[in-house]
Amino acid sequence: MTAALSVKGVSFSYGRAKVLRDVSLSVAEGEIVTVIGPNGAGKSTLLNVIARSHRLRHGDVALGGKNTAGMRQSQVVREGCVLVPEGRQVFTTLSVSDNLVLGGYTRRKDSRTKQLMDEVYAYFPRLAERSHQLAGTLSGGEQQMLAVGRAYMSQPRVMLLDEPSLGLSPQMTAQVMSVLAQLRAERNLTVVVVEQNALAALSLADRGYLLSGGQVMLEGTAEELRNNPMIQHIYLGGAPSAEPVSKGIAEAIDHGQAEK
Amino acid sequence: MQLLLTALALGALYGAIGIGFVIVHRLTGMVNFAMGDIAVAGGFGAVVASAVLPPLGAILVGAVVGAVVSVVMYHLAIHPLRNQSLMVQTIVTLGVGIAIRSLIQLYFGSGPRQFPAITSGPSVDILGGRIPQQSLWLIGITLLGYLGLAYFFDRTLSGKALSAFSVNAYAAGIVGISLTTMATIAFALSGAIAGGVLAAQVPTSFIAAGAGLALGLKGFIAAIMGGFDKLGLTLIGGFLVALAEVVVARYVSAAQASTVVFVLLIVLLILRPQGLTRQVVADRV
């Protein structure tokens, strides 16, 4: 079976600083995979290279078996791979609904915009209440919902999320994560989520990769990574608030799966 | 009243060129100092077209020529430098302006050109002032262009995409909006409104190849008054520049009119660099 997303031997540097060294990973269709690692490990860079916000110079990225070399950013989106960037990056001076409409920019020729928007509003009822508000007036959590909704508008097969829990309350994180689980269950969406909040990410994901110093140090099922002594020591022990967060997320995900 | 009417017509022209500045600046963050010369190119396009077309058709051709010159300029001079700093791009526009001016001069000479008005006939009396019919056309065309642009930015997907790109270029890229497409649209629109409106002004006075620089600077002042962001305020800014110019020309000296306008520019830059808008437009990185 061809992987929904396959990354082979990708390296990337900012000037002379090497950020990614020969990174390879593979994500099956409908899988949720997390990439965890410390600050500066190259996690965000990896996603930006896949989504082509950064140029791909060394290595290969394939979507559903199709090599994306030579594709422009907009073509990658059209191929069904969309990024939910770090820090949300919504269009602050435009309304919530305009943000969503623009999310479907690459699909502007088909007329499903209205239907897709209704789907987004169904996943995030809060956005429906605020559809005419300017995106800049939303709370951080609402902006994160909007960023996910905007990405959904491009009808992706693979969604890349960069630190979706950053600056969000545990409840808000749980809500966003549960929608991701729901999207996977209902739409067979493939999800790659980059997180510093390792425990939250591992409770959502099927598998995970540990990235450090621009290299893949470990890979395994979420279960294996959670039980790995190194990860426990470095990432899980140090976060006092991690326990209740992951519990809340686990419950939310159970809830999401019960709905399916 | 007479001064007001004259300033209205002249201000529409400055405002339109200012809008040209604003559209390009909002998207790319650079200042296109070739704007005045692009408008003049549109004006000469209209002069040429007026040989075979009625004046209204010629003005339309003027808008198209302005748009084409502007887009060609983007792809030849700016796009190759898209990874350079804004300063580099802005300086290049000065060079392009000189090139356009010289080419026009080479081809048409430096003498003034003109073509007939859309409707001939005596000037119209409005509240004791007199205004040529063509000036009313000019104001009308400017307002139409402004309303069209406002509708474009508010209501159409491409317009929203342009706004989105100005707000957050990185995020615009992520949703698949490409800079090249957006810049092409922005340069086309800015060239079209500047070229078309200047073409509409040609019948009331005349046009000479060297007019671009001064026109561009006055449009630039209008754009500053609009905070380099607001189209409506830019039009008002254009009117204020024109008003200052005609008042000085009437009561002081016609020769000093431009001097006073540029002194105003300096004063404005010192006192209200944010223009007529309330808050300072955030600096783009």
Image (cartoon, coloured by chain):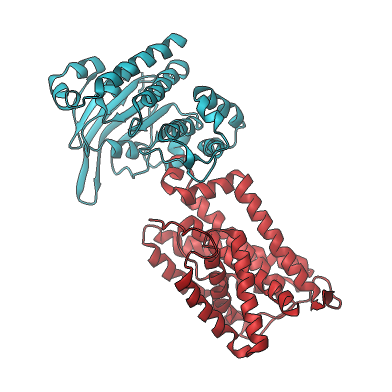
Q: Quadrant of residue B85?
A: bottom left
- Give the farthest residue toward the top: A258
Q: Which percent across, then down, holds residue A114?
A: 61, 30
Q: Which percent across, then down, holds residue B44?
A: 65, 74
Quarter the N terminus of chain B occupies:
bottom right
- Chain letter matching colour cyan: A
- Residue A173 shows in this picture: yes
Residue, x 65% and y 62% (percent of image)?
A: B64
- Chain letter matching colour red: B
Q: Is residue A233 above or below residue B280?
A: above
Q: Which percent across, then down, holds residue B138?
A: 73, 69
Front-most of residues A17 and B44:
A17
Residue, x 60% and y 74% (percent of image)?
A: B241
Q: Is residue B198 above or below residue A162?
A: below
Q: Quadrant of residue B148?
A: bottom right
- Give the farthest residue toward the right: B121
Quarter the C terminus of chain B occupies:
bottom left
- Residue B52 shows in this picture: no
State left or right for residue A109 relative to residue A250.
right
Front-most of residues B155 and A3:
B155
